[in-house]
Amino acid sequence: MSNYVQRFLLENLDIRGAVVHLDSVWQQMLSDRHYPQPVTQLLGEMSATTLLLGDNLKQTGRLTIQLNGSGPVSMLVIDCNEDLQIRGMAKCAQHIEPQSVPELLGHGQLLITLDMPSMRESYQSIVPLDGDSIAEIFQHYFKQSEQLPSRLFLITTNQSIFGLLLQKLPAADQQDPDGWARAEALAATILDQTLLGLTAEEMLTRLFYQETIRIFDSHAVHYGCHEDPAKIYAMLRSLGREEVDSILQEFGVIIITDDICNREYRLDALAVDAIFREASPTIH
């Protein structure tokens, strides 16, 4: 199993890039979700792109990327922290036929939010959905936000996801006027999936065999969903005993759903009583 992000530099071309690969982490994200295949495809491509952006976090923080649309896929949301712990989910119609990405998403917007303890308030960027694929939507975002020509190559299956990012640095044309076009053409050959069983180093060496490649240390990716009952207890205490008891009286049990982690917490009267006595309740 290999779950990582690995950055590289084509030194003679002044082009930087990164590779992302997930298998076991991706399978954990999909477990018991039962998304239609077109939704799985979009979620995988979003996950790869989020990690390529999140790997740039230099300090404690959380990056959240969300696509909201008017189509049968109404929301895709992925977030990760500086340790590349990732989680994500989709909201969609139960049955979806294969369609183009604009048809699946409809009219909508891309929201990118960065939360860091060192920041007084969250940074948020909102841009319209512009492109016929997830790759094109984010290439448009990169062009606006970083003002760097960028290319994304994304592959998703039920077993694994892969992403390759290329970015043209300011001195690239001075280094080699044809370098960017050549690197794009070589990178596009990854889409036939013949190289996906290789390590990042082997893959990059074969793709850019004529170039001088500096490959940096890989960063491991982990699944970011872990049970955190303390947050559930704190939320219920913030509501107050009277409010919680009224919900309990009406429904007989309190059910709290964590959509992004696909987890449900059920608390009966004994569990609620233990929370307000600050004991250790049993959550089902």
Image: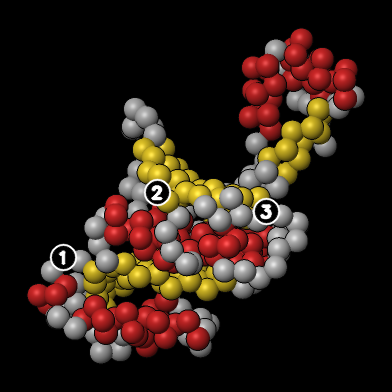
N-term mark: 2 or 1: 2
Let me know if residue 6 appears in the view.
Answer: no
Instruction: Give the Cα separation between the discs numbered 1 and 3.
Output: 40 Å
Residue at the top extreme?
242
Where is residue 66 shown, x and y percent of the image?
A: 51, 48
- Please report whichever mark, 1 or 3, sits nearer to the chain's N-terminal start: 3
Q: Which residue lies furthest to the left in this view?
A: 174
Query: Disc 2 vs disc 1: which is toward the camera?
Result: 2
User: What's the amino acid at mark 1?
Assistant: Pro
From the image, tell me which residue sits under label 1. 170
How many residues crowd around disc 1 within 10 Å: few (fewer than 14), some, or many (20 or more)? few
Q: In this view, does 184 lie to the left or right of 84?
A: left
Q: Residue at x 67, y 53 (%)?
A: 92
At label 3, counting other C-alpha atoms closer than 10 Å, the crowd grade (few under 14, some 14-19, many 20 or more) is some
Tell whether 153 sits left or right of 91.
left
Residue 45 x %, y %: 52, 64
Residue 2: quadrant of the picture: bottom right
Indicate the quadrant containing the N terminus: top left, top right, bottom left or bottom right: bottom right
